[in-house]
Amino acid sequence: MKLKVMLLGAAAITAGLVACLDTSHVAMACSLILWNTNGQAVVSGRTMDLYIDDKPRLVYLPRGIARRGVPDANAATWTSKYASAVLTGLDTATSDGINEAGLSAHLLYLHGAEHEPADQRPGVSNLLWPQFVLDNFGSVSEALEGLKKVRVVSTVAHGREWPLHLAIEDASGDSAVLEFVGGKLEIHHGKDVTVMTNEPPLDEQLANLKRYKLFGGNLAMPGDIDPMSRFVRASSYLKTLPKPAGTEEALGHLTGVVRTVAVPFGAVDTSGGESADAWPTRWATLSDHTHKVYYVMPVNSPNVFWVDLAKFKPDSREILAVDPYAAGLSGDISGSLKTFGSIDKAFPQGY
């Protein structure tokens, strides 16, 4: 019998997935950077900035898990083809992760996102968008083709919908950002798609980038935490990174860029934007797409730890997990994850 997972319910949104939300209007959270031109390894990094503790959990999910995309009758159903290492929020859904093929998926907030109207395609909750990708596909091109067959549904939870956009990258360095703008899905696809933050949509972010030095303009690089400023800052530092001598140095250089868009605890937004809060970075991740290694950097500790997907048994039928805030985690913890129990326990807020 194939493993079955009870998935996230409409009334149980997780802080990990809404981490990039400002409850009044504008989100001040989350940044993503892909470095695919360093000559050593394809690596990406992201921050997760939250106004509350999302109680994240690092989870290893094996192959063979049967899933359902939405609670409705017209739901997409699938069985996971690829094993993955993911970060969940409140044990209910995936915020970020990488699969055994080196494909990563990341949810970030996008204020004003408007989904497509209903049609005959089976549905997948936008809260399960990244896991659908990680379970089913080994490359960006495969994912984009497969996503044509489903309709991503904006999920109502806690009395409102959660507008999100998705970034995916693979071991070849290919990348895509998927955004729902004006009721249509806009896809930015190519190896030059390397930075994503929050609103406005990516095409407006790229137009704004041209106003700054290094990109044809004359404005100095901004230092505040506004999403557009973080986009400019990440793009600028990414462009000037030196060639690394090896994979470790590539990861180290990328970590330096990730830290420039992280938000310290107690930070105040000075951009003049409409957000009432500047949320602190709770954790960050790095994905080594070439070697299939997933790095976690929680801010409750100066340590970095990681899991190597090659060291797991993808057909083991065991879900393994660890609390990333646990004391003493450092270095390779692939052998330290413990059996999490039943599949249902991994997603207790299921349908």
Image (cartoon, grey):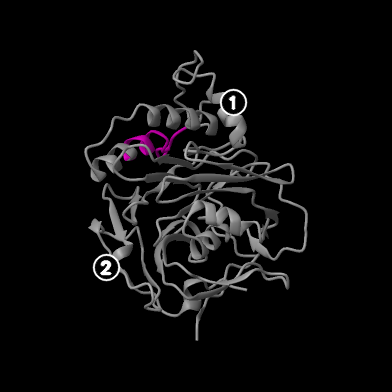
Mark 2 residue element: loop
- In this image, 103 relative to 200: left or right? left
- In this image, 117 relative to 48: left or right? right
Give the label, 1 or 2, closer to the camera. Answer: 1
Can residue 33 be seen here? The reply is yes
The residue labelled by disc 2 is 336
Task: Please tell me how crowded label 1 is: few (under 14), some (14-19), or many (20+) other residues with Cα within 10 Å.
Answer: few
Q: The C terminus lies in which quarter of the figure?
A: bottom right
Task: Please tell me how crowded label 2 is: few (under 14), some (14-19), or many (20+) other residues with Cα within 10 Å.
Answer: few
- In this image, 147 relative to 169: left or right? right
Give the residues drawn in magenta, as a range.
255-268
Amino acid on which disc 2 is placed: Ser
Q: Is residue 300 above or below residue 262?
A: below
Q: Is residue 227 above or below residue 101?
A: above
The residue labelled by disc 1 is 207
Question: Whole-percent x and y of residue 124?
Answer: 64, 63
